[in-house]
Image: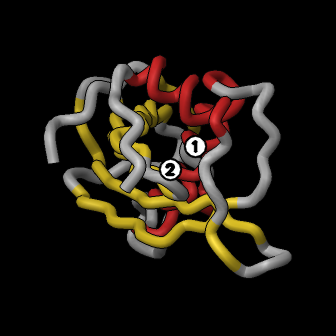
Amino acid sequence: MSTPRFTFATTIRVRWGDCDAFGHVNNASYLSYFEEARIDYWKAVVPDVPFTGMAIVHASVDFRGQAYPGDVLTIRAAVTELRRTSFWAAYEVLRGETVMATGRSAQVFYDYATQKPSPIPEAFRARVASYEKIEATSG
């Protein structure tokens, strides 16, 4: 995987409830931070595309540092690959200039009525491909 080109970022203040008994952000909280970044990305990049249903089919996090209650974190997000029914996203969590975590996720557009993947809406595909300057593959 090539290095993501991050052009989108959002911020989150670490809440006490995000932390574990050791006083730092619990590993599971980073997946919630990624989710917040995806939601903010959607609102910023494709606000007029209806959210039709999506399922996470892969998520991974690499931990690099510790964050604490009250820290303001910047979560960078980028869509790195568009396929027929799914897309990959990359994330970087920073406290100041220090990387706390990186990660990836794969999302599939999903029709919950039929319980099957559905094609990425063309408006989403076109706008994201243009914003990210990536090719919208069909595989």
Please provide percent x and percent y for residue 33: 53, 50
Residue 96 position by quadrant: top left
Assess disc 2: are there few (<14), some (14-19) or many (≥20) residues with their C-alpha within 10 Å of its C-alpha. many
89 on left or right of 128: left
Residue linked to disc 1: 38
**Which disc, if any, is residue 34?**
2
Quadrant location of the C terminus in the rendered image: bottom left
* Nearer to the camera, 81 or 77: 81
Dividing the picture into quadrants, the one containing residue 18 is: bottom right
SS at mark 1? helix
Along the viewing direction, whichever of 48 and 78 lies nearer the viewer: 48
In the drawing, what numbered circle is on residue 75? Answer: none
- State whether residue 129 is above or below residue 113: above
Q: CA distance from mark 2 to mark 1?
A: 6 Å
Task: Report the residue at 34% width, 35% height from top.
Answer: 94
Q: Residue furthest left?
A: 2
Q: List x then y, in percent, for residue 54.
A: 66, 61
Residue at the image position 32 percent from the left and 54 percent from the top: 103
Labelled pair 2, 1 in contact (Cβ < 8 Å): yes
Label 2 sits on what residue type? Answer: Phe
Q: Is residue 81 left or right of residue 98?
A: right
SS at mark 2? helix
